[in-house]
Amino acid sequence: MSETREIVEQCKVLYEDLSLASVKEWKQRTGGRAIGFMPVYAPRELVHAAGMLPVGIMGGGENLEIIKGDAYFQSYICHIPRSTIELGVTGRLDCLDGMLFPAICDVIRNLSGMWQMLFKDKLVRYLDLPQEFTKEIGGTFYKQELQGLVHELEKLGGKKVTPEALRHSIKLFNENRRAIERLYNARAETPENLPTYELYLVMRASNVLPVEEHTALVEKYLAAAARQKRNKLDNARVVVTGAFCEQPPIALIRALEASGCYVVDDDWVLGARYLLGDVAMGEDPLQDLANAYLGDCVETASRYETRLEKGAFLIERVKRYRAEGVVFCAPSFCDPALLERPMLVEALNRANVPHTSFNYAENTSQYHVFKEQTGTFADSIKLWGTA
Amino acid sequence: MIMQKKMIANHFERLSNTDKTGEKAVYTFVPGNLNELIWSFDLLPVHPEINALQSAMRKQSGDYVLEAEKIGHSEDVCTYVKSDIGMMRKGNIGPTGQRLPEPSLLLLSYTGCFTFMKWFELLKQEYKCPVVMLHVPYQADGRITPEMRFYVTKQLKDVVIPKLEEISGKKFDLDRLRTMLASSARSEDDLVHVWNAAKNKPSPIDAYFGGVYYIGPIFTAFRGKPECEEYYKTLRAEVDQRVKDGLGPITPDGKMHKEKYRLVVEGPPNWTSFREFWEMFYAEGAVCVSSTYTRVGGLYEQGFRHDPDHPLESLADYCLGCYTNRNLPSRVDIIAKDIIDFQADGFVVNSIKSCNSFSAGQLLMMKEIEKKTGRSGGFIESDLVDPRYFSAANIKNRLESYFQMLEAKS
Amino acid sequence: MDAYVGIDLGSTTTKAVFLDEHDRLMGFGITNSRSDYDVACQIAREEAEINSRFSILRRELKTHIPGEGHDLAVAWLYQKYRLAQHTRQLTALAATCRKAVDLLPVAEHRAPTHLLLEQILSEMEVEAVGLFKPGADARSDFFRDIAASTFLHLSEKKAGDDSKMLDRLIGTFDKSILQVESKSYANAFGEYIQFAADAVQRMPEFQVHQAAIQTAVKNTVAVVFKIINTIGTGYGRQRLPFPKEQIRSEILCHGLGAHFMFPNTRTVLDIGGQDTKAIQIDATGIVTNFQMNDRCAAGCGRYLGYIADEMNIGLHELGPLAMKSKKQVKINSTCTVFAGAELRERLALGEAREDMLAGLHRAIILRAMSLLARSGGVVSEFTFTGGVAKNQAATDALRKLIEENYGEMKINISPDSIFTGAIGAALFAKRDRKGDLIGVDLKALQKPVPSKVEGPVAKVQERA
């Protein structure tokens, strides 16, 4: 087995482990607690500083059969809440001592209330991320939110979260973000050596691995991928956007690549890359975390865009990664992604960037149509430089 | 009714004349709106949801929605947004047939619904006009914390008011705001009195289908204005008289014969077939004695009133308090309490495809309410303004089955 | 004799049930629903009345003919009765067809068409005799179906290569059958049964029972049904020509009907062609909670129909094929449209057809499981009704999932469940008559299910 393959296989085991065996194992080993969080962005540093393991919950993916979850949701609601409920009510998330629901959309917001009703003995916290980004107003509010969360975690863990611990956590997550940036840059540089489904699985591992382990994993994968030269194909370089919450199935990601696209940037597992720079490590770590959130972050549908023009961030990414087109890949019934799309389309049209779009569900099991579509898209880019 | 029509007609007349009068329009959303504040700067409020629902009642929304889908909007998303975008693309002709003015400001009071943000981002692209964001935190634990109130108040003081001053060219006039808030509170007292009248048997009002008319003035452009106060005073007197006379609610077909079932309704109504939908209730003798939709703008039953002594704080509490800004356990409590207080036989959930804020989690809410009250709920599905999503036969079948079940159980 | 009638006007078939004063089920009737609901309703009711008379006839004969002999006698009487009715319908069809040929637009077409038509009609008459005998395997009992298949087959034979002639003949039939169908031919019980009695008693084995048959028939004909009350239900109930007080929702009727069939039922699942219902009932059969499928057809019988079309096989073949599956596959698209696409794609990728089908059956049952959960779960005893209840792949999947999610319990699956709604309606007809909807003692209503009813009644159920 090649080095990369070995790493990817290890990540795949974690990805397919819907009952969170690795989290249980971690808890047993360390005696610590585990706190789940939903997409997009949660300040994992706080959980870490409280001596707990932050665990990213991104639905059940393609491998979970929904037996109970559908009873909770109407057919016009996206898939991630039903698989998450399925995981919850079937006991697969029992090892989590709490769940965080960051502000992203009405469905996930209401899921927090459902969790309150269904899992009364667990810590359930809705995390209201401010849409006002000045330090005095949004910053003050957010810092109070963070303080509130710290307080809850302290109560749960029975010990104070010290500024030192927080700074240490910030440092580890800064390192992790930097490693991930290197990973993404490497892929954009030599996409043939870092197939997207591999990178995706490495990213997904960040949901369950302790941050130090994940950083090491990323470095190890990067080194292995650099050593393992693969043939470069005449693929179209694309940025994929729209999948910041409910994740596409692996097979869809593979189909996308197999159809002739090199993905050079994406918004999958976006929380791990939400903050664009390092978080400062000053006297007041909570303030530093708040400032980071207010400042340099990705542009995504659940975050209010204060600039007049939408899509500047996307176009900037297209340029930075020398992408030739954009693939909108959004979950069905995802209000934020789907309402965002026409605005981004307009921005891309203005910038003459070719684009194509499709919808999926996390458990979609037909890829033929997507493949045809993205294949044609890639071909037209290669042939005429437009789609 | 006539009073309300006149109020609306005057308002839209004024809106259509802005190019002559130089008055400026501020687009803003209904839930927790800042009507008094907007008027205190002599700016004219426009509520896009109201335009969308009015378009639906006039059977125009179907075309508007299609228009929006034609330019790339997904079939999956909120049809209020699509109806609004479609209307704009087709000339921005408002519900009274008069042209609506372009916004001088989009006041994005972001409460109880995430889609509002995308909605105004979309409008911002279209109109290239300024937007002011008022982020209202969610009552995730079922209460307003001092931090939340401070956050909203601070935004009002430091962001919203300066912007309104800039757009209107007028200084903020606290006394004028206070006068309006005092007037609002009087209307609110009267409205709560009207809602409580439904505790009588028979109920003199239908608090859902009739209720959407009763909330008209207070939730839209008129709260805090003398004509609004006048409206609620008259309404209150009328309802009191009906109670005295032992009369039931008025329906589009006149008087209701007999109150057979008393219901609490959760979720907005369907607007494209509003009358047909209503008829499915009153024809069966079903009266809605309370509804959650009539708390979508603001919730007064638990004692909140706009307060001239604490103007900004009470505006903040109003924003924070509207129904969809409350967590699901609180919503369950509100409905369960109403079922008991209003002696309802049951409750019906109208699950709206467009509105995840209302709909996501409703099925679990139903189970919880059933557990709490021992009453079974009825469940139907429709949409706000998409006529493709109203299946009359289907809904009627369910409602009838539900009513007959109540009858058989009783 | 006092009778209470329940009518269930469904989307594909209309059912009627007669109940007597002692809450015994007397007779069932079923016909295909058609555009004219009044006629469908009338015919089903007449069928049920005839069926009831056969119940009486059977009782009468039993007292006169010892041993098993009366069974055969009733069976023959029933078949001869059907023949008489069929002949009457054929005569009507013949007359209508002749008129239609007279009206053919091109005059010179008329004579040759007449010629062939007469040949066809006379052969149909002969063929009919063979159709009606005990144990004969009729594909359908509806006149339209029988007549259409014979007419088509004979027309093809007669017209040979002349496709224009074939078109004319079939056109004639299509026009005429509509008119024949919209009339009832069942109102002449006395006449048909007399014809049947005459024919049967001439048969060597029944000659000794001649007197018994004549007496029994006479007594049966003499019975006058006094219909005390009728209740209508079903999806088309709004179009029944009844006042509002005589209409009940199918949910209520289904609940009460299931309670009648299996008195300990607490949860009912009905998967029909158009919708799926999950119903909770109390110890007296009163509905306490229910849920129906949401807007989309996924999870209804129609979904299977769609899949059958997609795979180009018969609907009834789906279940048996799925039973051959060796491995469980997961179908994710419960949307009918996507399921078709998923099916094609996965078949193309080499998935076995039977495994895919098993997965699809499971997908339908999973939808039903959601409705059950929404309505309040599954409580023993659990009764499964509706067309899909006849599909073993579906019932197997259901049993498994119920056991996994709600533990072991008694599961009732009735092949006669097509009458569940009509039975409930008839019970409501009786209750309402009593004027005491509240507190009716339903223990008194608990009688065995119609599968134990003998002879023609059972036959009626078979065709359901």
Image (cartoon, rainbow, N blue to C red):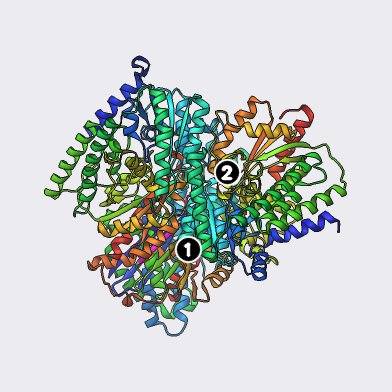
Seen from this angle, which residue lies furthest left? B245
Q: Describe residue C431's horizontal placement relative to residue B354 as left or right.
A: left
> Where is residue C221, by image quadrant?
bottom left
Residue B86: image x %, image y %? Answer: 47, 29
Q: Chain of mark 1?
A: A
**Badge 2 amino acid:** Tyr
Evaluate whether residue B324 shows in this view.
Answer: yes
Q: Is residue B351 visible in this depiction of the protein?
A: no
Label 2 to label 1: alpha-carbon separation: 31 Å
- Which region of the structure is painted magenta? C287-296
Within 10 angstroms of label 2, few (less than 14), some, or many (20 or more) residues?
Answer: many
Magenta part mainly helix, strand or loop?
strand
In the picture of the structure, the residue carrying the numbered disc 2 is A293
Q: Which residue is mark 1?
A: A118
Of the pair C245 and B398, the residue shown nearer to us = B398
Q: Residue furthest bottom?
A: C67
Q: Quadrant of the C terminus of chain A?
A: top right
Does the magenta run of residues contain A137? no
The subunit carrying tag 2 is A
Q: Is residue C439 left or right of residue A330?
A: left
Residue C240: image x %, image y %?
A: 34, 52
Earlier in the chain: of badge 2 and badge 1, it is 1
* Residue furthest to the front: A283
Is the C-beta separation of discs 2 and 1 under 8 Å?
Answer: no
Residue C68 % position (x, y): 47, 82
Q: Secondary structure at mark 1?
A: helix
Given the image, on which type of amino acid does mark 1 rest? Leu
Residue B309: quadrant of the picture: top left
